[in-house]
Image (tube, grey):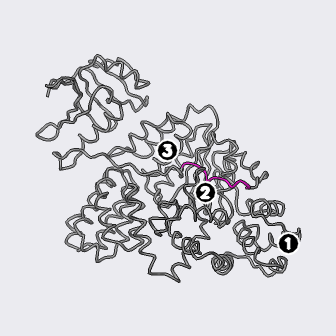
Amino acid sequence: MPRSPLHILRWSSERHQYELVTQHHLEQHFHTEHQWFLWLETATSFSFQGASGRLNVYKEARARGGTYWYAYAPASKRTRKRYLGQTANLTFERLEEAARALNSSSPETTSPPQPVEQPVILRTKLSPPHLPVMAIRRERLHTRLDAAESHRLTLVSASAGWGKTTLLSAWAAQAPERVAWLSLDELDNDPVRFWLSVLAALRTRLPAIGKHTQMMLNAQQPPALTTIIMTLLHDLETLAEPLFLLLDDYHHITEQSIHDTMLFLLEHLPPHLHLILVSRIDPPFALSRLRLHGQLLELRDADVRFHEDEAASFLSQTMGLTLEANDVHLLVRRTAGWVAGLQLAAFSIQHYEDRSEFIRAFTGGHRSLLDYVQEEILTGLPPALHDFLLQTSLLKSITAPLCQAVTHETRSQELLEAIERANLFVVPLDRERRWYRIHDLFREALQRRLKATQPELVPLLHQRAARWYEEQGARQEAIAHALDGADYDYAIALMQQRVEVAWLRGEAQNLYHWIMALPETYIRAHADFVLTATLYLLNTAASVSHPQHQSTLDRVKQMITVHLSNDKYCSVCG
């Protein structure tokens, strides 16, 4: 390897930018990569000291002509080398990736570095569900939400079926450029995936932010999450206009470390950034303190329930049903203004000649309404549509190719459109109407019916979904469906492919939960894999701060004691 370079390109955590040092003197700050490429035109070597590691970089001539950049890093008794490409390829991100690869402590030093798999963030997670053409505008609630601009946190907390997402979608549509939207699900309980998703949402409105935040999140050994969030907040300090970060379905988040970092974000929000959480339950934050300081805006069941005028507009405009004022009054009273109940009742009432009599006999409560789904709605559907709904109810989001793979129904797109036309509790997630989401309560009723009438189909449908997701590169979703479908061999095969990625990406929580979901017989049959996974988890525990460290160690010990013999437990834990 040539002698050490004179120039050093280093990452400044104080200034959050790269800077050039020559013979111990600061020569230049690189505010843009354009400035960096201008300097590279005459350079032949430099040292790199990035967020992900250190290496020396040289421009070398090839025997057949042309010059190319190579990176070198010491590794025990030998030097590791990596091809970087031509000058145009030498971005800061490329250098960080090389530093991560060459400074890896992996024992397989002779193997070519593999690209780190990025979490699949569906485009539909980054935009509000598409509103129905005849959706009503709830002015009183829009006015309440407009006050979010004067609060740090807006919390919309109500149980399922109150129209929270539709309300926020309509409000966001008034000024979409001011709302960074993220729909959450169970897989977002991994802290790295969660914050990468938040960053992706913010980039839909601020494309230039977060480059260094992403580098740190993608590092093999990321810094503390609070350090990463402070870097992101530094980028957001330049906001000149209000921006709302809206996290829908926050009730899916159960990982305490995410709650802790969200509270940290909340406490350090720049003046023009506001947080909106939409959830079925309250987050474990100190809400009383926020209330005391006038920093919390709240909308709850009592606020979002439909008033009689709103119910009348909803029934006529959205459901195409005109009722007498007395009937609307009684129906609102029976359903307590619960929009899912209004929708279910409106669908059922169309089959009765005496609508007033139906409303008088109609009783509220989620249980009875779910019974109406089974007794009044499903029984009247054409067989093909009935079976299609039942079989796709195991999917959280649906699109025609996925539905076709799961149901083997070649008319999947046609049936999805028929479901939407029939107001069967399906919400389009994009303007192209490719992705849909079935209302949770309706989906739960469909699942109950499927498991009661065709239980043998349930594992098969999950297994088909797992293979479709794996083909799309969405391995986390694939593993989840494989486990739900009791296809444990396939789930383990997918986990074995992902175990190192989970370690590199800091995604240990999902790996832990997947392994704990396996039957003991499969754990014992794949003890080597479980042992490897625990070692990765121990490595993760050693690199994170307390209390995450103790939490990870506790999970490792639980995994070992539940599934491995005492002698193996002692060999791992000491």
- Based on the displayed image, in which of its 4 quarters is residue 461 positioned? bottom left
Q: Is residue 509 visible?
A: no
Task: Point out the image quarter for the N terminus.
Answer: top left
74 vs 320, left or right, is left
Mark 2: amino acid: Pro
Report the residue marked by disc 3.
Answer: 200
Mark 1: amino acid: Asp
Report the residue marked by disc 1.
Answer: 327
Neighbours of disc 1 within 10 Å: few (<14), some (14-19), many (20+): some
Report the residue marked by disc 2.
Answer: 428
Q: Secondary structure at mark 1?
A: helix
Point out the residue furthest to the left here: 77
Chain-order first, disc 2 or disc 1: 1
211 vs 45, left or right, is right
User: Which x, y percent locates residue 292?
Assistant: 68, 51
User: Which x, y percent locates residue 101?
Assistant: 26, 42
Residue at 29 percent of width and 58 percent of height = 497
- Based on the displayed image, in which of its 4 quarters is residue 491 positioned? bottom left
Chain-order first, disc 3 or disc 2: 3
Q: How much space separates mark 3 and mark 2, taking CA atoms?
A: 21 Å
Neighbours of disc 2 within 10 Å: few (<14), some (14-19), many (20+): many
Q: Secondary structure at mark 2?
A: strand
The one of 463 and 386 positioned closer to us in this rendering: 386
Chain-order first, disc 3 or disc 1: 3
